[in-house]
Amino acid sequence: MALDLKVSRCAITKIVKRDLGMSSFKRKKVHFLSQLVKEKGLQDAKEATNVQNDRILASSPSKVDEKFRYVSRIQNPKSVMVWAGVSKMGRTPLVFVPQGVKINSINYREMVLEPVLKNIGRDMFGGTSFVFQQDGAPAHTSNVTQSWLHDNFPGFITKEEWPPYSPDLNPMDYSVWSILETKACVNSHTSIKSLKRKLCQEWNKIPQKTLRAAIEALPDRITRVIQNEGGYIE
């Protein structure tokens, strides 16, 4: 500002603080939140119990009914790593990554590409042509994986064609994962088995028209990203 107005920084500081009564603050970097994530956060916030502000008025704790006296809490809620794919024609099964396993090119091929996707063209698309899209995870963009996709799929978006850091253009990221999480994780799970079972139940309940709508939104989102010169569109 001082350079633009051709005055000293000291003069600008005095004007801002003394005359305008303002201070300057740096803009904070924050995680990007899609609309679905914001809505999920709002829902969770409304349902959450704040133990610092939640109070009961009584002459003594013993006078309070036990069902109102305590708030349950789960230590270290369970979590899993899961892979899935969607198309206008259907969905893949959920693939759960074993605890402690890091997904690299070899594991990706052995757990996803070979058993789930190798025959996807025949099983889901009836032999018709399709284009495969995935995000930019290292296991997805390795030369080994790219070569496998080239040999086994009629078409796929290469690592050179797919823009990095693009949750705005991945239907799983901007829509599907949030839907599944909202349905399956309303309540915390005390076991991995319970969490997996609920994820599978809710995954199969998502209407196909919902998945199709998420995919059909992609061309419009691409246009909006271009209009926004590569910036976020949410």
Image (cartoon, rainbow, N blue to C red):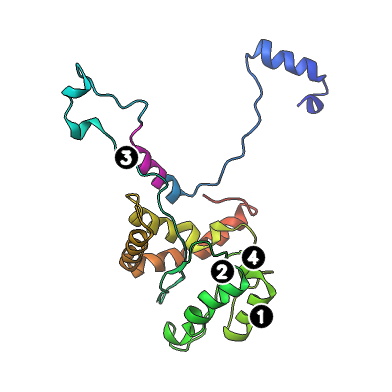
Around disc 1, counting alpha carbons within 10 Å, would you say few (fewer than 14), some (14 to 19), or many (20 or more)?
few
- Range covered by the magenta-colored residues: 39-50
Mark 4 secondary-structure assignment: helix
* Residue 108, image x, y percentages: 56, 72
Which residue in the protein does label 4 denote?
A: 138
Q: Amino acid at mark 4?
A: Pro
Q: Amino acid at mark 3?
A: Glu
Which residue in the protein does label 1 denote?
A: 147
Around disc 4, counting alpha carbons within 10 Å, would you say few (fewer than 14), some (14 to 19), or many (20 or more)?
few
| Sequence-earlier tag: 4 or 3 | 3
Which residue in the protein does label 2 denote?
A: 134
- Dot in front, 4 or 2: 4
Can residue 214 be found in the magenta stretch? no
* Residue 232, image x, y percentages: 58, 50
**Helix, strand or loop: magenta stretch:** helix
Q: Amino acid at mark 1?
A: Ser
Which residue in the protein does label 3 denote?
A: 47
Marks 1 and 2, how far apart at CA: 14 Å
- Dot in front, 2 or 3: 3
Tell me if residue 63 comes above or below residue 102 in the rendering: above
